[in-house]
Amino acid sequence: MALYLGFDCSTQSLSAVVIEIDGDLRRVVFQHSLNFDHDFPGYGTTAGVRRGEDAREVFSSPIMWADALDRMMATLAAAAEVDITQIRAISGSAQQHGSVYLNRHARDAWRLLDHTRPLAPQLEGSFSRQESPVWMDDSTSEDCEAIDRALGGAAATAALTGSRAHERFTAAQIRKFHRLNRGAYDATTRIHLVSSYLASLLAGSDAPIDVGDASGMNLMDLRTSDWSPEALDATAPGLRMRLPDIRPSWTPLGKLAPYWRDRYSFPAAALVVWTGDNPSSLIGTGVISEGRLAVSLGTSDTVFACTREPRPGASHVFGSPNGEFMSLVCFRNGSLAREFIRSEHGLDWPAFSRLLESTAAGNGGAFMLPWLEPEITPRVHHAGLRRFGFGPGSPALDTRAIVEGQMMAMANHSAEIAGHRVTRVVATGGGSINRPMLQVMADVFGAEVYPLDVGNSACLGAALRAFHADRLDGLTPVSWHEVVRGFTDPAASDRVAPISANVPIYAELRKRYADAESLHQERAPIC
Ligand code: XUL
């Protein structure tokens, strides 16, 4: 029996999936999530994050992530359905862009972990900054402007690194940290992404950053897949020596550290470099060749596609874990905005779905710009749900308007990224179990929608990447199509087809939505 373990450390939870692959036998044997707010209340997070005094600042706790990893390993070891001794390889993914700041004690702390004691307390004293700024942080516009200016303008930054400077990207966050906390920056010997930090904890030593997650930093040269000296200089002095190396997404990291083997009787499984949640989802949705489009409905909603070459026009170009590229558009107002409307009207999810089903496509011309929080796409700094053609107070109108608004934004802003008219969309993420919502997606995109069996495609992608790297390491490589076979094949019975009468309604409403968006979006700062 060959088992592969994948993790995903998202904004709100840590998840694990174990898959079994033996020839044609391909199945998920274990899935579990730990929710940061509920399972780790001592860290005081709300929806997985903490806010700074400046509301634009959003942090999480690197110690909490370590604590969650420890608890998940204990859960796995105790799970009756998994024989952990059969785990051959392990990989993971994490929310993108977030950064972890370590001091000179970190390496020794990792190397000398005492297996009789919990992980988290042993890491205290190894951080030069207790908080990790995460992807929801919007406080670095000044740093974005400076980075873009130094690199020759936003278009030049995008051509070099795959994206113009973005507030949540790691370069702007590091620049701000250096600017405002010079002493703490000087005491920082290593800056990790969330993904490479957690990989380091499993390895007991410093892990590299993979190409997929490194391309979400505004620091990697997309052509060389290595750090760009110009981008490093534009960010902070002495940065190169504080960053790990960048490696391909299938790089082996050695064996699981003795700490985990001795603490929970795990085997000496092979570790594989971690990546970002979106690159990992690309594998976990099977969107591994050109012409397919995935929509992930999570804390952030994202739309992404795999491309052979970097595709101009996409808001972000990342390295893909299959060695190609991915285009991605990210929307900050995903599940939290949907949940806000749901709880404002005292609805549970079944009631929310029933309201969607009982209201007409197009909401009689009423619509909403769903910017509960400052938005990433388009760039909106002043939050607010903006209603057109109706006022607040109606559960039915609000429910349809939030879902339609989000779907129209995704369809409009992703028109460029797949490079052709999309006829099929793969849906993933927590929201993808909601069929009435998928019906709106199908009608707005004018495409068939296929939800996946495993809701957490980033986690599944991590387990599949572990399998791929293990076979490569054993000199029996398998193609990516073979890797995903049996896990990501869309089931015809799950298909949600567009309703032909609804498609033209949305084609029209999408134009009005786009006009309203450009009228009500503040001008982006010139950077
Ligand atoms: C992508 C992005 C988010 C995070 C959330 O650019 O910022 O999707 O990765 O996990």
Image (cartoon, rainbow, N blue to C red):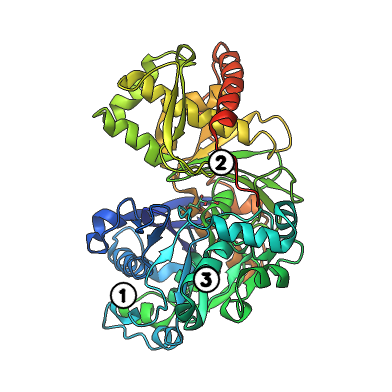
Instruction: Residue 474: tell me if it is visible.
Output: no
Question: Please, is residue 180 above or below residue 285 in the view?
Answer: below
Q: Which residue is mark 1?
A: 120
Q: Which residue is mark 3?
A: 179
Q: Amino acid at mark 2?
A: Thr
Which mark's residue is nearer the viewer, 3 or 1?
A: 3
Ligand 1 contact, mark 2 (Cβ < 8 Å): no
Q: Which mark is residue 377?
A: 2
Label 2, residues with CA under 10 Å away: few <14, some 14-19, many ≥20: some
Q: Amino acid at mark 1?
A: Ala
Provide residue 254's location: percent of width, then percent of height. Answer: 54, 79
Q: Earlier in the sequence, mark 1 or mark 2?
A: 1
Ligand 1 contact, mark 3 (Cβ < 8 Å): no
CA–CA distance in space, label 3 to label 2: 27 Å
Looking at the image, which residue is at 41% across and 74% down? Answer: 129
Q: Earlier in the sequence, mark 3 or mark 1?
A: 1
Q: Are marks 1 and 2 in contact (CB under 8 Å)?
A: no
Q: Amino acid at mark 3?
A: Arg
With 180 as the anchor, is 324 left or right in this view?
Answer: right
* Element assignment for label 3: helix
Q: Are marks 3 and 1 in contact (CB under 8 Å)?
A: no
CA–CA distance in space, label 3 to label 1: 29 Å
* Element assignment for label 2: loop
Provide residue 349's location: percent of width, then percent of height. Answer: 30, 31
Provide residue 160's location: percent of width, then percent of height. Answer: 74, 59
The image quadrant of residue 133 is bottom left
Question: Please, is residue 357 above or below residue 418 in the view?
Answer: above
Q: Earlier in the sequence, mark 3 or mark 2?
A: 3
